[in-house]
Image: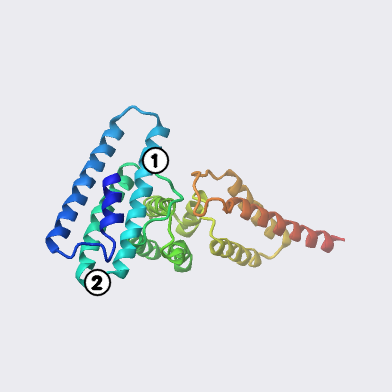
Amino acid sequence: MNKLNHLIYEHFAPGVLAVSAEKRHTYLREVRAEKMKITAAMRELSQQGAPWEYKAQALRRYQVQVVLLLDALEQYHHHADPAVKAFYTEASTILEELLIALEQHFPEYLAQDVFMPKGYVAQVVRQLEERFRDTEKYLCDRRVDRRLLELVIRPLNRQHLYITFGMVMYYRRLLLELRENVHPFITDLTERVHYTLHQYNFNSTDYFMYCTAQLRKKVSRLRTLQEKKGLLSWYEKELRNMNSHGVSLFPGRGGLREQMLTWLREEKYFLQTLLTTSES
């Protein structure tokens, strides 16, 4: 990485970059050569019997350094003359191939809380949105509430360019699960989507508010307080017995299941108070 750092930080900045097109082509050849060396080093590292921690440290070093270099090239691009913008774009494309290799072959080793480079993340989000639209059409054709599905993609759009590697990995797994584990023979596909979102701890505030609003609607349709309390107890039991995949949309924000269980307890307590009052 030292050669790449030297090239990009010392020779590629606007105002320093060589005017000669031939010299810029030489620089791009050097960037490609360094990319090949790093790719070979990563391949060799993967074949070693080194401890997981050692591999993670080495691969995360590549990850962070490439992100910083791509961010630098993005800044150069904004301040560059039109004649050299294509140079920065091509240099960035070469480095992005390293991130693609890291994501494809070493996802379990990467630092999840690192923000993706702005230029690269735009491509990644576009790919995720395309995958989501396919899943959305598949589910909407089977009468899953479109408002619910819109909540699934909303955090990705709201985060815009401030998206971490961890969030992208999360969405790739979630969208795959939503499409592959929702089968046509399941009677209520909407409930299955909810089940998947709870398993994946989709701890979006908007989604939590949607869930509680939908449950209130279901409860309001029942006639007696006993029936209402019984429905809430059934949901509480289902949530307690649900398996978790050990991931979160927003790590550190808390668990969706815990939020829902707290809400259910409070709703049941309120109904019990009404029941006791009506019987006294």
Residue 179: % across, % down: 37, 54
Q: Quadrant of residue 59?
A: top left
Q: Quadrant of residue 260?
A: bottom right
Q: Does residue 50 lie above or below 272 as drawn?
A: above
Q: What residue is disc 2 on?
A: 81
* CB within 8 Å, label 2 to label 1: no
Q: Which mark is residue 126?
A: none
Q: Is residue 124 visible?
A: no
Tell me which residue sits at (30%, 42%) in the image: 105
From the viewer's perspective, tell me whether residue 96 is left or right of residue 174: left
Tell me which residue sits at (82%, 59%) in the image: 276
Mark 2 or 1, which is nearer the eye?
2
Q: Earlier in the sequence, mark 2 or mark 1?
A: 2
Residue 75: % across, % down: 34, 64
Q: Quadrant of the C terminus?
A: bottom right
Q: Residues within 10 Å of mark 1 (few under 14, many from 20)?
A: some
Q: Is residue 190 visible?
A: yes
Q: Which mark is residue 109?
A: 1
Q: Residues within 10 Å of mark 2 (few under 14, many from 20)?
A: few
SS for callout 1: helix
Q: Give the tally of numbered discs.
A: 2
Amino acid type of the residue that numbered disc 1 sits on in the rendered structure:
Tyr
Q: Does residue 235 lie above or below 245 as drawn?
A: below
From the viewer's perspective, tell me whether residue 31 is left or right of residue 249: left
